[in-house]
Every structure is written in structure tokens, then in C-alpha cells.
Amino acid sequence: MEVGEIGFSKDGGAINWFPGHMAAATRAIRSRLKLSDLVIEVRDARIPFSSANQDLQPQLSAKRRVIALNKKDLANSNVLNKCVRYFDSCKQDCLPISAHSRSSVRKVS
């Protein structure tokens, strides 16, 4: 299915698995990516792989990017450290942050 497509439930009823506002945001991001040299991709530190927007990954991987893993204070520190080491091994910049901490957010700049 493409972004914004309608799927069908087991009983045959139509379900919208990707709400219109999310599809519109994805389109807007795609158009802005063409103008961007650097992308800061914010993901949830508790689920750093599944919180990535898979529809945008091909475009994002072609850009210089920093992955900011937000909510580091809520994540399992052992798992988070392994994820950061994984991204480092892939030569991908990655910063665990907490958006509630100014000093943490300053690391991104």
C-alpha cells in the first residue's frame, strides 16, 4: 500500500491505516528534503528502530543526517547504549537526548 491508502478489515469494511494529516506531513517533509543538506531525524529512544518513518528512509539515507534518540531518560540505558554503538558502527551520527533538558538538546546543535 502507498501512503494514505485505504485498507480493508477482515469483515470487508474500509479502514484508513494512515490518517490524512500524517500523509500530508510526509508529503511536506519529502518536498523539504529536496532543499535540505542536513536532517535531524528525531526518533523515540525506547523504540529507535520501529519509530523510524520507513516511507522516508530512502530519501533520508541519501542525506547527511543526525539521528536524535529522544526520551533517553525513559529508555533502558543498556539497550540505548547498544543502539548508539550500532549506529556508530554504521557510521551514522546518533545522539541520545531528552527534549526536557536544555543541555541535552544543545548537544544537537
Image (cartoon, helix red, strand yellow):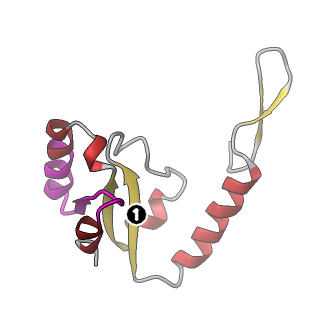
Q: Nearer the viewer, residue 48 or 46?
A: 46
Quadrant in which residue 18 is drawn: top right
Question: For the image shown, how many numbered marks are present on the structure?
Answer: 1
Residue 91 in the image: state x and y as whole percent: 18, 63
Residue 2 falls within the magenta-colored stretch: no
Q: As drawn, which residue projects farthest toward the top? A: 11
Amino acid on which the number 1 mark rests in the picture? Glu
Q: Residues within 10 Å of mark 1 (few under 14, many from 20)?
A: some
Across and down, in percent, residue 1 comes to 68, 42
- The answer to whether residue 70 is above or below residue 37 is above
Q: Is residue 1 above or below residue 62?
A: above
Relative to 36, is 31 on the left or the right?
right
> Where does residue 5 sit, x and y in percent of width and height?
75, 44
Element type at mark 1: strand
Residue 100 is inside the magenta segment? yes
The residue lying at 57 percent from left, 78 percent from top is 32
For the point 24% across and 61% down, the residue is 94
Which residue is labeled 1 in the image? Answer: 41
Left or right of 14? Residue 94 is left
Q: Nearer the viewer, residue 87 or 95?
A: 95
The magenta stretch is 82-101
